[in-house]
Amino acid sequence: GQNIDQPTEMTATEGAIVQINCTYQTSGFNGLFWYQQHAGEAPTFLSYNVLDGLEEKGRFSSFLSRSKGYSYLLLKELQMKDSASYLCAVNPTGGSYIPTFGRGTSLIVHP
Amino acid sequence: EPEVTQTPSHQVTQMGQEVILRCVPISNHLYFYWYRQILGQKVEFLVSFYNNEISEKSEIFDDQFSVERPDGSNFTLKIRSTKLEDSAMYFCASNGLAGNEQFFGPGTRLTVL
């Protein structure tokens, strides 16, 4: 089966740094996505990691360790607009695309 | 900036009725997807579509569901006989050949009574 774990909710202060973790146990692994979803809106793509390591994209970075079944999304210089749900999704099947999503982490940024 | 569009934004239907949800992917994209999200729950993959045929589908995508690209721009999801548990937000997404960034539409909220 597929199992993806993320914290349900996190809070942080404007201007700070926050790390959202995701662990997965899946029947295979082909890549891991991070999406941002504001309430009532569609998910927005943030990153896709296939190989181990850190990928940086502006204020957002995503890290992957395939051997540990672990990823994190790092958000720097938090802004109020970063308050959203952050979804971790794993594509477990090589050569195809059938992603499994986590339940998402609701991040609340306060002044 | 090009974007994925979906119509209608909200659809209310009676149980047992057929519904068709419509999507217009970004014009030069080749891969199309449908997802659903039941209120308060996680996003679930339904189906992917490429080169006028289904590439992959999840266990959710049973015989009640079908997809079609009737012309060069529209991509539709049909639910033949809706059930109460089909009530959800349905998102369409698309991406091009390069990369894995999918662009999601704003969604259609389906309510089955």
Image: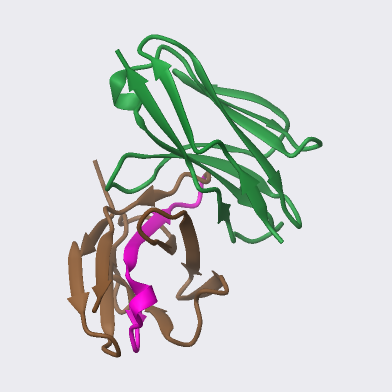
Q: Residue furthest top?
A: A15
Is residue B69 at least partly visible in the picture? no
Q: As drawn, is A59 to the left or to the right of A48?
A: left
Q: Residue A46: image x %, image y %?
A: 46, 35
x 30%, y 43%: residue: A39
Q: As drawn, is A81 to the left or to the right of A18?
A: left
Relative height, residue A99 to residue A44 (above, below): below
Q: Residue furthest right?
A: A67
Query: Which colour is chain A painted?
Result: green
x 34%, y 63%: residue: B90
Point out the stretch of residues depicted in magenta: B78-98
Q: As drawn, is A97 to the left or to the right of B84?
A: right
Query: Which of the pair B35/B30 is nearer the observer?
Result: B35
A63 in magenta:
no
Q: As drawn, is B2 to the left or to the right of A50?
A: left
Q: Residue B74: image x %, image y %?
A: 28, 70
The quarter of the image holding the C terminus of chain B is bottom left
Q: Which chain is brown?
A: B
Q: Residue A66: image x %, image y %?
A: 76, 37
Relative height, residue A38 to residue B62 (above, below): above
Q: Residue A44: image x %, image y %?
A: 38, 41
x 46%, y 15%: residue: A76
Is residue A56 at least partly visible in the picture? yes
x 18%, y 65%: residue: B10
